[in-house]
Amino acid sequence: AQTVTQSQPEMSVQEAETVTLSCTYDTSESDYYLFWYKQPPSRQMILVIRQEAYKQQNATENRFSVNFQKAAKSFSLKISDSQLGDAAMYFCAYRSAYQDKLIFGTGTRLQVFP
Amino acid sequence: GAVVSQHPSWVICKSGTSVKIECRSLDFQATTMFWYRQFPKQSLMLMATSNEGSKATYEQGVEKDKFLINHASLTLSTLTVTSAHPEDSSFYICSATRQGRGQETQYFGPGTRLLVL
């Protein structure tokens, strides 16, 4: 069975600085998708970024980028130029290419200080 | 975009009553809809997966007769919590995947807070 591990329950960053959130996963499959979702205090889950496992190039969305290391089964999220609005819970998620389900990590709470 | 709505956003009910939560995909047709439950400061727990016109697939440990799911159309799924009890109080979130390209991505509704007194 696949698992997703987020080893950092909490992280903090100063506004305008850069922070990296860690995520590792375990799978025997070669075809899958990885996601980072953000859940602010409103509790609305917002897609931040997604990565297809077959793509070697790391995904980027504006200030958000990932470091996808397939062999190491690592999928970290880098937030550049952090803003106060980035404060939220961040969930890493795995989806097999063969199943609909998302498997979530336990989340990392990010605090942003002015 | 891919907008998913939920109604109601919050509900308070008496123990023993049933509560229905609607999940709608507003600007796309959803091949599959998912229902999650989230306890405070915890991750999302998948309850069931539903496809339009077929029976929902429930996760292990989720009572089918307690949490009734109906997926009547490609844009609407409902979750009914039957004979609700205080332990059913939680935050319920739905999500949907769209047909075609990008169908692996789940788009989430804003959630429904349920409080059973």
Image (tube, rainbow, N blue to C red):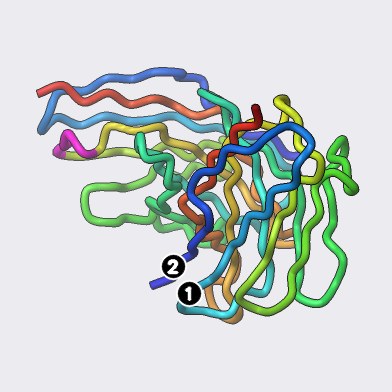
Q: Amino acid at mark 2?
A: Val
Q: Position of residue B80 (x, y in %)?
A: 74, 53
**Residue appearing at x 65%, y 45% in the figure:** B36
**Residue appearing at x 38%, y 30% in the figure:** A21
**Is B59 on the left or on the right of A67, as rendered?**
right
Looking at the rendered image, the quarter that the C terminus of chain A falls into is: top left
User: Does the image show residue A49?
Assistant: yes
Position of residue A98 relative to residue B12, above or below, is: below
Under tag 2, what secondary structure? loop
Q: Are marks 2 and 1 on the same chain?
A: yes
Q: Amino acid at mark 1?
A: Leu
Subunit of label 2: B
Span of residues in magenta: A81-85
Q: Position of residue A99 (x, y in %)?
A: 75, 59
Q: Main secondary structure of the magenta part?
A: loop
Residue B3 numbered mark, or none: 2
- Marks counted in the figure total 2
